[in-house]
Amino acid sequence: MIRKLLILGAACTLAAGLALTWATTPSNAADCGGGYVGLTYDDGPDPATTSSLLNALTSNGLRATMFNVGQNAQNNQALVRAQQNAGMWIGNHSWTHPHLTQLSAAQIQSELQRTQQAIQQATGVAPRLFRPPYGETGATLRSVEQQLGLTEIIWDVDSQDWNGASTAQIVQAAGRLQNGQVILMHDDYATTIAAIPQIAANLRARNMCAGMISPATGRAVAPDGSGPSTPPSSPPPGGACTATVSAGRQWADRFNLSVAVSGTNSWIATVAVRSPQKIIATWNGTPTWDGTGNVMTMRPNGDGNTFGFTVQHNGDRTWPAVSCRVG
């Protein structure tokens, strides 16, 4: 899933040559005429995978944004420094990866602030970017983000690596990225790491480069921060559109969720369940499905800006990831 909770144990220290790999990679001089994309990896650092992830990125001339879970960062500070030394940007992904929209303002403040402190302790720099777990956001969360000087980053493309996507499927998803867009990936999947050489080759073939995510606009720009100073006309997911998820009735084999959309009357919401979960009923919206049956796209049907659905959990009661964008 989009989270991995407590990663314990001693951190693995990367070889000193890792940072130098980036400095001498010929890909730095690549043609970036096609624009920049934001590669992001959530839920790290992980002693089992982060070193391999960083080696794959640097050896392919790629830089990315690492959205670290605070507890993982606290327990693996050497790996956080390795991310920094490898030329990666580091963002805040909350302390324990909870459903923040279900917490009080004080609890949200603690989740974000503790993560800020852990990452700053490891690197000397406090993050400026924040990715809400599950892509769930709301007015209270955004107020706390603003207090801490954080820019909220959702995504334009979901690799579905958390949902069992194969390496080929992850590569295919990354191939849909356009200038300024951001893709969701994760630190802790071998399939995701294996996709990196093909992602790099695809970007080169399209004269595109991996860039930083601008704290000003939330869009991918050149690594030196140059690029468009204003957001695109169609805001990224979570920009002008907010999806707030709340619990409904629960049974032994299923549960209901309700999604309230705000910020626009013309919206497109995406709901991604984790196999073996299945959505077996919906209301107050018009749904369509992807080929896997695990990703539902919901559009308004004239019954307002709140819709709901029933999840047959089949043993997994984790809430699906919900996001929205302006339609």
Image: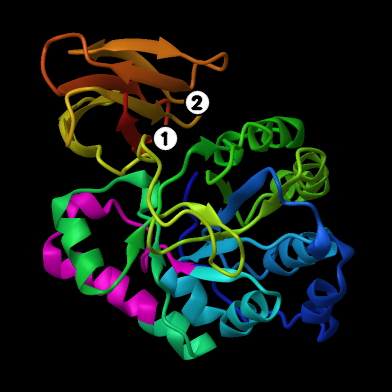
Viewer-nearest residue: 198 or 188: 198
Q: Measured from the top left, where is residue 2 in percent x and y? A: 48, 47
Viewer-nearest residue: 110 or 310: 110
Mark 2 neighbour density, 10 Å: few (under 14) some (14–19) many (20 or more): few
Q: Is residue 115 magenta?
A: yes
From the viewer's perspective, is 327 left or right of 9?
Answer: left
Q: Residue at x 50, y 72 (%)?
A: 72
Q: Which residues are magenta?
A: 91-116
Q: Which residue is mark 1?
A: 316
Q: Where is the C terminus found, in terms of image quarters?
A: top left
The amino acid on which the numbered mark 2 sits, given as a three-letter code, is Pro
Q: Would you place residue 35 above or below residue 142 in this image?
A: above
C-alpha separation, residue under disc 1 versus residue under disc 2: 7 Å
Q: Residue at x 42, y 72 (%)?
A: 70
From the viewer's perspective, is 205 left or right of 301?
Answer: right
The amino acid on which the numbered mark 1 sits, given as a three-letter code, is Asp
